[in-house]
Amino acid sequence: REEKGIELYKQFFYQEKLWVSNEDEEPYAIIRAGSGSIESPKISADGSVIAYTFNIPGSSQLKSINADGSNSRIIADHLEQYPLGGPFRLVPAAWSADNQKIYLTTTTDSEATPRGLYAADIRTGKIEKLSAPLVTPWHLSFSRDRTKITYINFEMNRLDDQSKPSTPYSVSMTNLATGETTELTKSSEYQLANPIFSP
């Protein structure tokens, strides 16, 4: 029915519940967001903890919960105060190798372009801006030791010929400790996507 389809879309888009599934069990919800929404859940390398952004009217929180549904807690509150230059929210991108930090990118529902990369310390809740270019790190991928990132960057421009990308797509790599960035490749002919580090 049409009404059911709308409800399913609403639940998918706003992620009103967070589900887990063990190999021999049916999926079950460990979070019911109520009046808020769940965004960008990321599980730790050992599979024990899930970090996510919890959005409520007027504010966003970085939260974590054990994969079995226990020990739900707020890591950092008022995420919207950290990024500058737009109405952005911070959302998890990856855990650090030692599971003590959560790397965050910015996102927004508006037409503004989110920029920057951040890290939240799960013990103190402190969020710091990392040494990375002020670009949008699309299709972000981390090296296994979390010391480097690779990503796609591009700027949208109007084109008369819609069959080609509007501007060159580039693949770059950044050292998070130093901020040193190397452009690995660029293409005006192809839309590059999803760079991934080899093991």
Image (spheres, rainbow, N blue to C red):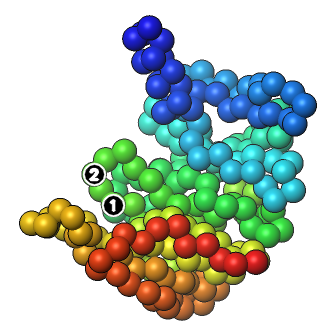
Quarter of the figure with the C terminus:
bottom right
Residue at (59, 36) in percent of width and height: 38
Q: Is residue 36 visible?
A: no
Work out how far the residue at label 2 is from the one at label 1, CA to CA, in angstroms. 7 Å
Q: Residues within 10 Å of mark 1 (few under 14, many from 20)?
A: some
Q: Secondary structure at mark 2?
A: loop
- The circle drawn on residue 113 is 1
Percent coordinates x, y for residue 191 in the rendering = 36, 69
Three-letter code, disc 2: Glu
Three-letter code, disc 1: Thr
Percent coordinates x, y for residue 86 in the rendering = 34, 57
Q: Is residue 20 left or right of residue 135?
A: right
Q: Residue furthest left?
A: 160
- The circle drawn on residue 184 is none
Depth check: give the residue in front, 84 or 12. 12
Q: Residues within 10 Å of mark 2 (few under 14, many from 20)?
A: few
Depth check: give the residue in front, 186 or 16. 186
Residue under circle 2?
111
Residue at (64, 28) in percent of width and height: 17
Q: Where 21 falls versus 101 (above or below)?
A: above
Q: Is residue 111 visible?
A: yes
Q: Where 91 falls versus 169 (above or below)?
A: above
Quarter of the figure with the N terminus:
top left
Q: Where 33 falls versus 81 (above or below)?
A: above
Residue at (46, 68) in percent of width and height: 193
Residue at (75, 57) in percent of width and height: 122
Res 148 quadrant in image: bottom right
